[in-house]
Image: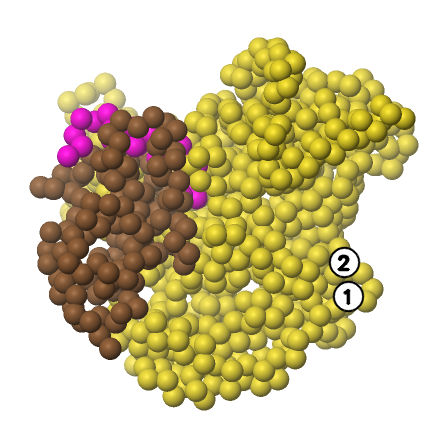
């Protein structure tokens, strides 16, 4: 029996199932009469569909049905954007393409068969005649005159002229004036490359329809079962109360399972059509085409300030690649989650940011771990280093000089948002201590004399998490509230089941939520069951993304636990015949003040609540509570990450030698789980910095289209990560937590690239675009050397 | 055309008529309903499907089930003995070596084979030994710790 509190590293309760092969992921669901669905996808990036001949596929033994977009056009509807920024162009997005395909992987037909092998065979027998059109994959070129247009027609007729989805901007202070006064201005063109999320479990859907009741049940690997149910109902017209969405065990997501996807609609509607259960499981190469990608910004950025190291402004102009269609949250990611973060942790008062979202013939782009914040942090932290270099100061000096001083209860910054609490210098100081900066600099100097290339890079990041205050989010374009719900049900024996609207995919909510319950009710974790990811079990919930689950969902749970405790205290006081204020609750018992032997245990009170033979007058029987938590502000985790790299001058290979992460995520429920999330996030950020990149040919073929071509980091790439924390509680929620799921991904890429550039700075290198592959760095070194030689000759 | 195969899986002999093209991983998952072994890619890159075939770590998506005819296969379901976790399973739990759990069965089977070959590997031998199995959640940090803990447990069979 484990009685646990907050801030305890208890082992995860979900693990015994997962380490013994008893997990239940979507592909593990078996139903009688289950059929298998395979999708025919476009091999063209841009083409008109002239004709689809399904006759051979339909006749293939074992095939039950074949559908094209035209067959199901009305039932399938069009996938909407869930976040609408001003003047957003919203072209139709049919789950099965009807007249035109707009990226390689766009689905054009669905084959349903008795067996997945047969479904795949038959999919290859569907003959589609295309009229190929020129494609465009670059977000900047796509908006130039003469580029192929993806969504034809005028804006008010569902078109997107010039492939522009939106123009968005945020400004603070007066950047033009700051620039005029500045002694130093540094410019750079920075590419934040496209990434593929690579959750280890590809997506999958199982749908089962009961014609007699009209009930449709859908198991799907999603982060948002409740929002998905709502969206599915809106898109297809299937009644919301006759739809149950279940998110079973989920093999990772990182933002890539945060949307309504074509395959969810297709599988659900086809199951309804056929009247038998249908399963669709995504292959990995299919995943690379059909599941959203992340990042993909082209940015012209400028930073300005004075020679003493004071930074006065930052300005950027971004082309954000949205892919062929608007994914659910696509308009949010490169706008709000990006633009408002350009202040970083600095006293920057002049900001100018313009973002143009562009359609291209590529897989749709949406949130990938960090989502907008890594792009912003990378720009800010890279440019702070560029600025430090330009004024001849140490990057740590410049960071410290410009940092916002410590504050506990809100501070408004130039982009108009209010940070909750922070002590940025403290995190920096701790990180410097851990790496022993002075010692490292000496080592670096010595190494350079031997021709060795050592570098150190800093990232003093901040992020916006804990999505979100619903009214604020709605004013910025959110199509749904972002609060979270909880239900705490105390059973008559004092055991507890809690229902949360969050929907984890590796974050360990079963454990963290149990800890919150145990700490509040004084009952062992083993007496707590946590139910999530089932729309028939919970009230409406929002889901798991944006490092929000414990911040918003945990707080909703905390609120319900207080309600339960308050009612139980009333019952206990009544039964012990004392005024309520004389009853204290400690270690799972209601004790009468100063009379220690007069007490009732929590289970005793629970039993009385249900037996109801002696309750306070007017009190309803039972013991459960529901809460909805809608925070007043976002949370703003921050910290300082430091990377130390060594570059092989002969091969250009970058070796990550040390990685120090100091994070401040406010209060922590389970330090072991938080550390684990930091490790994983850092690995993804390092992956982006060093190896990962989704590459398209100019005509829209995904060249990095399999796991053999896209570099998912392996264990050999990393050292042991060194993690530590400062703790600045958030004043915006009762638990004081800030969210810990994304820190590593946000902080790591700039730390690593800053280290790479530092290692090469004496050669005159000031910037390297990600990923810093061996080839790219080898070329950078050769170019730098030849520049120096030529310089000397002249 | 179907083939008759007999495969011993987790100590139990199974005989089935199967297609020649059926992958071992699909045989395990779909014919024997042992869904602990996962499929994470289609290029033998991720290692989520790793099982032991005659004691050797094998990516079961790279082997046809007919090739395993007569073989002795161990999956993650077959590791625990007498109601006790295998020391590698225990170490993954103790050291928080998993998050979403999808790569975990493959990672555990890879580790079992690695420690059989090299009972006390160095950190770099561990990293190199598990590089064929991908994890996207943990940054491998606690997986490495788990392998070290299993090696140090003195409980390895």
Please provide the residue range marked out in magenta: B135-157
Residue A181: quarter of image: top right
Instruction: Provide the secondary structure element on which disc 2 rests.
Output: helix
Q: First in sequence, mark 2 or 1: give its number.
A: 2
Residue A3: quarter of image: top left
x, y percentage for residue A328?
Answer: 56, 60
Chain coloured yellow in the rendered structure: A
Tags 2 and 1 touching, CB below 8 Å = yes
Q: Please say if A97 is above or below A431.
A: below
x, y percentage for residue A83?
Answer: 61, 57
**The hue in which chain B appears in the rendered picture of the protein:** brown
Q: CA distance from mark 2 to mark 1?
A: 7 Å
Nearer the observer, B14 or A537: B14
At a point 62% along the width and 15% down the height, the residue shown is A450
Query: Which dot marks residue A141?
Result: 2
Circle 1 marks a residue in which chain?
A
The residue beneath circle 1 is A147
At a point 29% along the width and 49% down the height, the residue shown is B58
Q: Is residue A116 visible?
A: yes
Q: In the rendered image, which quarter contains the C terminus of chain A?
A: top right
> Is B26 left or right of B8, judged from the image as shown?
right
x, y percentage for residue A195?
Answer: 57, 49
> Is A528 left or right of A640, judged from the image as shown?
left
> Is A406 left or right of B25, judged from the image as shown?
right
């Amino acid at each position: 029996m484990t009685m646990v509190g907050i801030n305890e590293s208890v082992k995860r309760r979900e693990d015994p199932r997962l380490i013994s092969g008893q997990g239940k992921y979507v592909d593990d669901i078996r139903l009688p009469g289950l059929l298998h669905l395979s999708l025919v996808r476009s091999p063209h990036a841009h083409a008109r569909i002239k004709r689809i001949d399904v006759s051979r596929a339909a006749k293939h033994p074992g095939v039950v049905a074949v559908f094209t977009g035209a067959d199901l056009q009305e039932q399938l509807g069009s996938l909407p954007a869930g976040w609408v920024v001003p003047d957003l162009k919203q072209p139709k997005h049919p789950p099965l393409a009807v007249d035109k395909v707009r990226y390689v992987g766009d689905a054009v037909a669905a084959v349903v068969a008795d067996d997945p092998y047969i479904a795949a065979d038959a999919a290859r027998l569907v003959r589609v005649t295309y009229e190929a059109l020129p494609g465009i994959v670059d977000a900047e070129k796509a908006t130039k005159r003469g580029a192929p247009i993806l969504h034809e027609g005028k804006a008010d007729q569902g078109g997107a002229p010039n492939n522009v989805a939106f123009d968005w901007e945020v400004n603070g202070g007066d950047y033009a004036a700051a620039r005029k006064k500045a002694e130093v201005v540094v410019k750079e063109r920075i590419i934040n490359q496209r990434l593929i999320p690579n959750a280890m479990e590809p997506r999958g859907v199982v749908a089962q329809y009961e014609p007699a009741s009209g009930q449709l049940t859908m198991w799907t690997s999603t982060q948002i079962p409740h929002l998905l149910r709502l969206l599915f109902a809106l898109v297809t017209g299937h009644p919301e109360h006759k739809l149950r969405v279940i998110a079973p065990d989920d093999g990772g997501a990182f933002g890539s399972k945060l949307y309504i996807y074509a395959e969810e609609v297709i599988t659900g509607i086809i199951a309804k059509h056929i009247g038998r259960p249908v399963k669709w499981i995504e292959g990995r190469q299919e995943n690379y085409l059909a599941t959203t990608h992340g990042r993909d910004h082209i940015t012209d950025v400028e930073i300005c300030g004075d020679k003493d190291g004071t930074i006065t402004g930052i300005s950027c102009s971004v082309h954000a690649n949205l892919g062929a269609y608007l994914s659910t949250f696509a308009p949010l990611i490169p706008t709000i989650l990006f633009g408002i973060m350009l202040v970083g942790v600095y006293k920057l008062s002049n900001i100018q940011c313009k973002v143009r979202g562009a359609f291209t013939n590529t897989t749709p782009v949406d949130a990938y771990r960090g989502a907008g914040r890594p792009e912003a942090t990378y720009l800010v932290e890279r440019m702070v280093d560029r600025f430090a270099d330009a004024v001849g100061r140490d990057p740590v000096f410049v960071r410290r000089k410009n940092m916002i001083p410590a504050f506990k209860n809100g501070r408004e910054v130039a982009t108009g948002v209010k940070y909750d609490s922070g002590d940025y210098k403290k995190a920096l100081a701790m990180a410097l201590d851990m790496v022993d900066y002075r010692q490292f600099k000496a080592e670096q100097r010595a190494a350079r004399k031997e021709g060795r290339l050592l570098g150190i890079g800093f990232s003093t990041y901040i992020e916006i998490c804990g999505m979100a205050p619903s009214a604020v989010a709605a004013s910025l374009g959110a199509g749904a509230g972002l609060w979270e719900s909880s239900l705490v049900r105390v059973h008559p024996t004092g055991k507890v089941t809690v229902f949360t609207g969050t929907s984890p995919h590796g974050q360990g909510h079963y454990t963290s939520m149990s800890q919150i319950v145990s700490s509040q009710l004084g009952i062992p974790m083993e007496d707590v069951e946590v139910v999530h990811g089932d729309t028939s079990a919970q009230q409406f919930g929002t889901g798991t993304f944006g490092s929000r689950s414990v911040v918003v969902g945990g707080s909703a749970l905390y609120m319900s636990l207080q309600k339960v405790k308050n009612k139980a205290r009333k019952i206990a006081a009544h039964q012990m015949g004392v005024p309520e204020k004389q009853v204290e609750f400690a270690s799972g018992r209601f004790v009468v003040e100063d009379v220690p032997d007069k007490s009732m245990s929590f289970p005793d009170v629970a039993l009385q609540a249900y037996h109801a033979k002696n309750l306070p007058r007017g009190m309803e029987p039972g013991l459960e509570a529901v809460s909805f938590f809608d925070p007043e502000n976002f949370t703003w985790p921050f910290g300082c990450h430091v990377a130390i790299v060594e570059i092989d001058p002969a091969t250009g290979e970058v070796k990550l030698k040390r990685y120090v992460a100091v994070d401040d995520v406010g209060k922590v429920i389970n330090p072991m789980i938080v550390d684990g999330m930091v490790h994983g996030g850092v690995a993804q950020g390092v992956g982006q910095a060093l190896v990962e990149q989704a590459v398209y040919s100019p005509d829209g073929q995904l060249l990095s289209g399999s796991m053999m071509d896209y570099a998912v980091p392996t264990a050999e790439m990393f050292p042991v990560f060194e993690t530590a924390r400062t703790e600045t509680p958030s004043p915006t929620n009762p638990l004081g937590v800030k969210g810990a799921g994304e820190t590593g991904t946000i902080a790591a890429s700039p730390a690593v690239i800053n280290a790479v550039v530092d290692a090469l700075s004496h050669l005159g290198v000031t910037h390297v675009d990600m990923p810093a592959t061996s080839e790219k760095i080898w070329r950078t070194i050769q170019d730098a050397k030849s520049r120096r030689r030529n310089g000397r000759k002249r | 055309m179907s083939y008759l195969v007999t495969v011993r899986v987790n100590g139990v002999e199974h005989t089935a008529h199967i297609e020649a093209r059926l992958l071992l991983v699909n045989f395990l998952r779909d014919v024997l309903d042992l869904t602990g072994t996962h499929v994470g890619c289609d290029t033998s890159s991720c290692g989520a499907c790793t099982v032991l075939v005659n004691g050797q770590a094998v990516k079961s998506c790279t082997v046809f089930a007919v090739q395993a005819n007569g073989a002795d296969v161990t999956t993650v379901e077959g590791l625990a003995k007498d109601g006790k976790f295998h020391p590698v399973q225990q170490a993954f739990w103790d050291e928080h070596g998993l998050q979403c759990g999808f790569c975990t069965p493959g990672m555990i089977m890879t580790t079992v084979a690695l420690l059989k070959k090299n009972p006390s590997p160095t950190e770099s031998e561990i990293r190199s030994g598990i590089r064929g199995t991908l994890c996207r959640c943990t940054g491998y940090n606690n997986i490495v710790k788990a392998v070290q803990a299993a090696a140090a447990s003195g409980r390895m069979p």
